[in-house]
Image (spheres, helix red, strand yellow):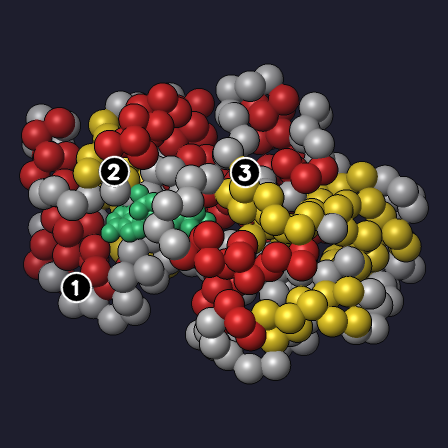
Amino acid sequence: MRAVVTKEAGGPEVLTVEEVETPTPRRGQLLIEVVAAGVNRADVLQRQGHYPPPPGESPIIGLEVAGHVAAVGEDVTGWSVGDPCVALLAGGGYAEFVVVDAGQVAPPPDGVDLVEAAGIMEVAATVVSNMDVVGLQPGETLLVHGGTGGIGMFAIQYAKALGCRVATTAGSPEKLALCRELGADIALDYHDDWVAELKEATDGHGADVILDIMGAKYLGSNVRSLARLGRLVIIGMQGGVKGELNINALLTKSATVTATSLRFRPVPEKAAIVARVASQIWPLIASGDIRTAHQTRFPLAEVRAAHEQLTGGSNIGKIVLTF
Ligand SMILES: NC(=O)c1ccc[n+]([C@@H]2O[C@H](COP(=O)([O-])OP(=O)(O)OC[C@H]3O[C@@H](n4cnc5c(N)ncnc54)[C@H](OP(=O)(O)O)[C@@H]3O)[C@@H](O)[C@H]2O)c1
């Protein structure tokens, strides 16, 4: 099969398409023939050598795919060869075929074609599982950074569907307008003093929950923006990994800071998240309550351009590779 191979860490130029051996499904696994693969920030980190796959997982980059079941491993029930599907992976997605535990596979949402579906599972599973971790409740205020990124677009709509007030940050007037169109109540330019603007827009309350993708750079600002009993969940490190935590600011609010990685969760946890997404989020997508993110598509051979687009600063929504 054709797959994207990285022989060394580096820029987009280390991504090459080569022939490699097609994997065989083990007990409990499915082999999927990939129609399209989602491109995620974590893929860039892995390419750069900062985010190696969990032990035992494929070294091939790629955390989500959509396609058709090509073979069914022993002890797998409910799937047949040819079934359309989407999968959450710990690696291996940038390839014509991938094997994955059957629990991490779901049918695509109704009315969504497979190329579009390839860009939904990773963001949906990340947002839903993290909002479960911090117990986001209807009526609470969520701040999500990067409102027009894959995570942000989904999080705004998910929190609105839950009955929350949503604040978000973005880096240009066009992107801020899109955030409002997606349902954000408060859209903040991250070049400005968004901490003060959030306080003002919420009458001094701040955010009950913050979904953060910036890490170290925003740690202090995020803690300052939390309401009493607020919860900050960090899922990205775009602004660095080591920050200074003001414990006094945290304890006076009885606030919580946590961080999670979907990729490193054990298989049974991922299976539970995938099942929850398929049963509770897919109907919201089918009904139009959650719109899938705008997609930019690249054929597999243009994988380098796909990575350049993701990190170039002008991208909106999701990027997928098509096979
Ligand atoms: N831990 C996990 O399990 C997990 C899972 C999935 C994703 N993630 C992480 O979540 C992050 C977002 O993923 P994604 O798929 O949404 O990536 P993406 O589509 O590439 O979006 C990146 C976002 O970062 C925003 N951004 C850049 N600089 C910013 C700043 N100074 N302040 C606020 N926002 C800023 C961008 O906003 P502008 O375009 O407006 O500049 C853009 O919306 C990534 O770091 C990814 O690694 C983690």
Residue lying furthest top in this view?
287
What residue is drawn where x is 90% and y is 55%? 71
Q: Quadrant of residue 142?
A: top left
Task: Indicate the position of residue 288 as horizontal and vertical percent values.
Answer: 55, 19
Question: Taking the image as drawn, is residue 295 in sight?
Answer: yes
**Circle 2 sits on which residue?**
172
**Upstream in sequence: badge 3 or badge 1:** 1
**Upstream in sequence: badge 1 or badge 2:** 2
**Circle 1 sits on which residue?**
245
* In the displayed structure image, the side of residue 21 where residue 205 appears, left or right: left
Q: Which mark is residue 295?
A: 3
Q: Label 2 CB, ligand 1: below 8 Å?
A: yes
* In the displayed structure image, the side of residue 249 where residue 130 appears, left or right: right
What residue is drawn where x is 38% and y is 54%? 312
Which is more toward the observer, 115 or 164? Answer: 115
Tell me the mark number nearer the camera, choosing from 1 and 2: 2
